[in-house]
Image: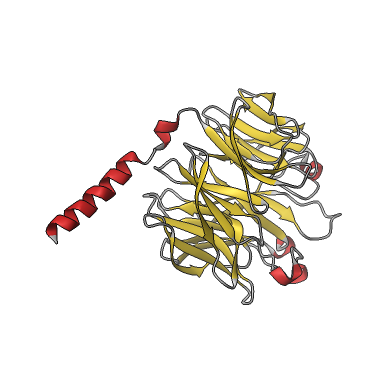
Amino acid sequence: MQRRRFLLASGAALGAAISPLWADIGHQLYLSAASKGDRSTWLVGVEATGHVRFSLPLPGRGHAAAAHPERAEAIVFARRPGRFAMVLDCASGQILSELHAPEGRHFYGHGVFSADGQVLFTTENDFDGPDGRIGVWDAANGYRRLGEFASGGIGPHEIVRLENGHLAVANGGIQTHPDFGRKKLNIPTMRTNLTVLSPEGTVTASYDFPEAFHQNSIRHLDIGPDGQVFAALQWQGMPTKRVPLVAEFHTGRTRFLDHKATARLKAYAGSVAVSGDGSEIAVTGPKGGHMLIFDKAGQPITDMALPLASGVAKTDAGLLITCARGLARREGGDTEVIPVSGGWSWDNHLVRV
């Protein structure tokens, strides 16, 4: 028995040793869900140079991805109300396995790993509740489902891990049900919030908007250099009402970041990211073909037309954005468009892995 246990332990250690790590795969890689003119749906692995390292067909439209903190592995999630998530080997560009949301649940397109990579947390909908849920998966043992807990609101979308290991969840407030496709069922009464949870599901903080902005759905998140959570918002109220589409949450405070060009986003902020050097905050507007830039204090710097500006992620020194012609790289205050072959229509997320 002791020999058998030793062999099993040795095998597990060997498996861990030969699993590729991020340092093993070389150049910086970014992931984005995309589609083509024939309505096919894909996951694209692209470098900041515009080189497509791999493209994988997906069984339905994808949304975002979550990168494992150590292994060269990522999880790609279905767009709401999809129920699939694919485990990707980023070294080989191959799908390793697939996760499925349990009965009565669907994914919201996002997830995040614990700092040690042992657990995967996913945003999900208990659509007959209705209630937002956080799925808990054993990332160390084949992504076995461990359980779930409440997200602290309705319609949890993006989830990010804070420096202390807690989870910030964008509860967008919008009730949906697969029987009605993507129809929004509660717009007049919706309430959006950002909830901070411990890894065990205990609410440690909750940020609500004033009544006048209860329809300003919190969707996508990034973390600032001082622990701030920046959020891209999508306005669900009267389209003629001018509202800010960026919020900052920090140490019990909620602050809206407005910009003279906010209206150019057409009430829809697609994605948000803090630059690699921490000097800029970028917010994309795919419907308006525009992008807003704020400084690290949240003050507006500039804006620019960028057709189909969709996903945005940090580079070592700046930002990388998916757009109509491929990618746009912004560093040192300058923006350069980089062509990408393949004719891709990008989804709202670009994830640096």
Q: Nearer the viewer, residue 54 or 104?
A: 54
- x, y percent for residue 103: 57, 72
Q: Nearer the viewer, residue 11 or 336?
A: 11
Q: Nearer the viewer, residue 220 or 195?
A: 220
Quadrant holding the N terminus: bottom left
Q: Is residue 9 above or below residue 285?
A: below
Residue at the spot x=56%, y=60% of the render?
123
Q: Residue furthest left?
A: 2
- x, y percent for residue 165: 41, 53
Residue at the spot x=41%, y=65% of the render?
200
Residue 292 visible, this orientation:
yes
Residue at the spot x=67%, y=41% of the render?
283
Q: Residue furthest bottom?
A: 129
The chosen color scheme is secondary structure
Residue at the spot x=39%, y=38% of the render?
20
Residue 300 visible, this orientation:
no
Marker count (numbered): 0
- x, y percent for residue 304: 76, 31
- x, y percent for residue 204: 46, 63
Q: Is residue 164 left or right of residue 92?
A: left
Q: Is residue 18 left or right of residue 148?
A: left
Q: Residue furthest right?
A: 240
